Image: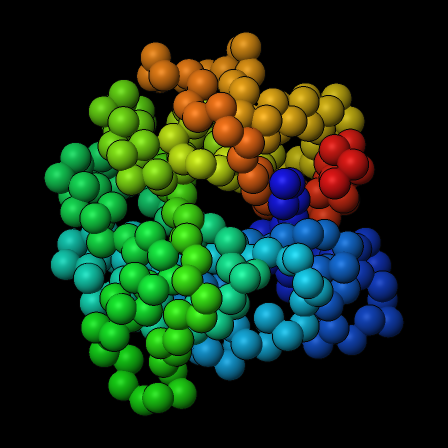
Amino acid sequence: MFYIGISGWTYPGWRGVFYPDDLPQRLELEYASKELRSIEINGTHYGLQRPKSYLSWYERTPKGFRFSVKAHRYITHIKRLSDVEVPIANFFASGVLALREKLGPFLWQFPPSFKYDHKRMEDFFSLLPQTTTAAARLARKNDLGTKDRIWLKPGTHRKLQHCIEIRNPSFMLPEFFTQMRKYNVAFVFADTAKRWPYAEDITGDFIYMRLHGDAKLYVNGYTETALKRWAKRMKSWSEGRQVTDAKTLTSRRLGSRKKKDVYVYFDNDSKVKAPRDAKRLRELLHS
């Protein structure tokens, strides 16, 4: 399955480009979720949300829609994975499980200054809950305080997915990719106009892509040729096949041959062309 979408959905520049001029802002999520199959929630990166927000997002989106959730930067950028069991518990207690079957992968993004440390990453991976039941159990260790900020219901027992986006070259070691495979954590294929490291090693049972721009970071839209190239690669990955010209660091090029869900989010051209590119890629894949 292809889940093609955008990173966030509230941007003034989309008025008259993606959203109709007369569309009330309160209906932007409803509109975007009918045009695209998935959205990456990035507000969760800058501050913990509340259960009522997740419940609202669930109710306002159609059946079969998926949200990916960008993890709180307090864990990755401020604490830098040091003593983070309670902060991670707070994140999972904040309402993410209220998305139920619409909950897709969790994105853990690390800053350019964060360097690879095997033990620190091992400790972090071991804390990540692999199921909704485990997430609810971990969430009970929260220190959020008031009940309106806490959601501890696991819902139907489901597997959870995690992915890592790195921006420091010290991570580009076979050791790190082997470590991710051990915990079924996907390495994010992040197109960043060559500003940050890029690889296409398949380390999880799903694929996660972030397209920030191929010529200039956060500036340009994607050409038809570029989108067709991505569509071709995504088709191979979804079928459990590695592309012949894959840029990889490990000898285990193919990973599992099982079919894989592919999540891709456009975060390019100061957000203006992202919806257009997402819609066109979806058309190319007949998704």
Q: Residue at x 77, y 27 (%)?
A: 224
In the displayed structure, would residue 84 be above or below residue 150? above
Task: Report whether residue 168 is seen.
Answer: no
Position of residue 229 relative to residue 58, above or below, is: above
Q: Position of residue 189 (x, y in %)?
A: 48, 32
Relative to the observer, which residue lies in front, 119 or 111?
A: 119
Residue 200 at x, y percent in the picture = 46, 24
Q: Quadrant of the C terminus?
A: top right
Q: Position of residue 209 (x, y in %)?
A: 53, 37
On the rendered structure, is 231 left or right of 217?
Answer: right
The tally of labels here is 0
Q: Position of residue 257 (x, y in %)?
A: 49, 24
Q: Is residue 49 above or below residue 216?
A: below
Is residue 114 among the parts visible in the rendering? yes
Camera-nearest residue between 179 and 31: 179
Q: Is residue 169 left or right of residue 6?
A: left
Horizontal relation, residue 145 to residue 227: left or right: left
Q: Quadrant of residue 205?
A: top left
In the figure, residue 32 lies in which quadrant?
bottom right
Residue plotted at (25% across, 46% down): 125
